[in-house]
Amino acid sequence: MNIVHIKGDYVPKIIENIKENLILEGRKTLIEKSYKELNIRDIAKTCGIGIGTFYNYFENKEKFVHEIFMDDWRKIIGLSESLNLQKSP
């Protein structure tokens, strides 16, 4: 759980799973559009956070996309390992 301060609002806004939500929205944008059309401001807005909060998690657009790809690879490797375990006698 993360607490995000919204400019002009003195009550902290609690948003859970910010990083995971950013990755999901980024992946969706990459699938539906393209890398060139992936806009950090739009991703942050869709996730209900400010652009500064995005940069607390990712240094730049390239690192963001890298993390999306790494997340996908971790899932693929996990799936592959589980399939190999199921094949073992």
Image (cartoon, rainbow, N blue to C red):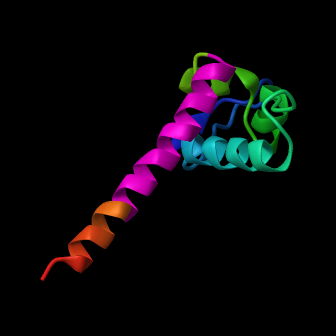
Left-right relation of 85 to 25: left
The image quadrant of residue 5 is top right
What residue do we see at 25% from left, 78% from top?
A: 86
Residue 55 image point, x, y percent:
63, 20
Residue 34 vs 84, above or below: the answer is above
Residue 8 image point, x, y percent:
80, 25
Residue 61 colored in magenta in the image? yes
Question: Is residue 70 visible to us here?
Answer: yes
Residues drawn in magenta:
60-79
Q: In this view of the protein, which residue sits in the foreground, 74 or 6?
A: 74
What residue do we see at 74% from left, 24% from top?
A: 51
The image quadrant of residue 58 is top right
Q: In this view of the protein, which residue sits in the foreground, 52 or 3?
A: 52
Residue 3 vs 76, above or below: the answer is above
Residue 71 vs 78, above or below: the answer is above
Q: Outermost residue, bottom direction?
A: 89
Q: In this view of the protein, which residue sits in the foreground, 63 or 12?
A: 63
Left-right relation of 44 to 84: right
Q: Outermost residue, left direction?
A: 89
Question: Is residue 47 visible to us here?
Answer: no
Residue 46 image point, x, y percent:
81, 44
Q: Outermost residue, top direction?
A: 59
What residue do we see at 77% from left, 24% from top?
A: 7
User: Looking at the figure, which quarter contains the C terminus?
Assistant: bottom left
Q: Main secondary structure of the magenta part?
A: helix
Residue 10 colored in magenta in the image? no
Residue 39 image point, x, y percent:
83, 29
What residue do we see at 52% from left, 48% from top?
A: 72
